[in-house]
Amino acid sequence: MAQLIGVAILFVIGKVILDYVKDQGNSTKRTKNKKSGEVIDLSEAWINTGTLPYHLRDYPLNNRELAVYELLNNLLEGSNYTINVKMRMADLLTLPMQTSNYQEYMNRIKERTLDIVILESPRLKPVLVVNVESQKDHKKKQLADQFRDNALTTAGLANIYIDPNGDQNDSSLLQSLRSAGLAI
């Protein structure tokens, strides 16, 4: 009788351990496949959606960015390239779902925007990122932009810097665009 009770106890312990191991495996799979974070309730209980505080920006680009946009627009006129401004990095870059620390990598690109992206028509394939930068930009910003540059380079997307306050003329900018791979 004692042996039968011992076998029953071992069976129960084994079952508990097996269930625990299965549960841990399933929670790991859920964590790896999870694309987004916490769900935010946007119902009337959370905020008054009838009176949202948003306003339209007067201009999406600052004066420096607008100057570079106009210069690029003139150079690319009549070509098979189009210009898009203020694109999120997450709209251009992707990660395999099985990437270790997937959510951390996604969070790093989700909120970052790119100043100007040149796309090749008709498929709108991204071919070049143009960063509007000044030599006067502080060192901390330059160090922070290293992540952006590394991510774009790793993904195979060329990027260049244009200083709107610099001595860059149309021919030197055209040469920079050609060096970056544009067929113009």
Image (cartoon, helix red, strand yellow):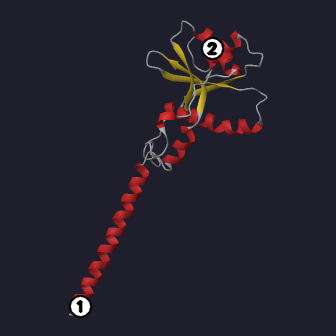
Provide the secondary structure element on which disc 1 rests. Answer: helix
Residue 44 locus on image (x, y percent): 44, 42
Judge whether 37 appears above or below 61 on screen.
Answer: below
Q: Dot 2, how many residues are within 10 Å of its Cα: few (below 14), some (14-19), or many (20+)?
A: many
Quarter of the figure with the N terminus: bottom left
Quarter occupied by the C terminus: top right
Looking at the image, which is closer to me, 19 or 43?
A: 43
Label 1: few (<14), some (14–19) or many (≥20) C-alpha neighbours in 10 Å:
few
Comparing marks 1 and 2, which lies closer to the viewer? 2
Q: Which residue is mark 1?
A: 3
Q: CA distance from mark 1 to mark 2?
A: 85 Å
Q: Is residue 132 left or right of residue 136?
A: left
Q: Which residue is mark 2?
A: 72
Residue 3's x, y, as percent?
A: 23, 91
**Left or right: 23 with respect to 160?**
left
Determine whether the residue tagged by mark 2 lies in a helix, strand or loop.
helix
Res 71 → quadrant: top right
Horizontal arrangement in the rendering, residue 27 relative to residue 12 (left or right): right
Q: Is residue 49 above or below residue 55?
A: below
* Camera-side residue of 42 and 37: 42
* Amino acid type, residue under disc 2 in the picture: Leu
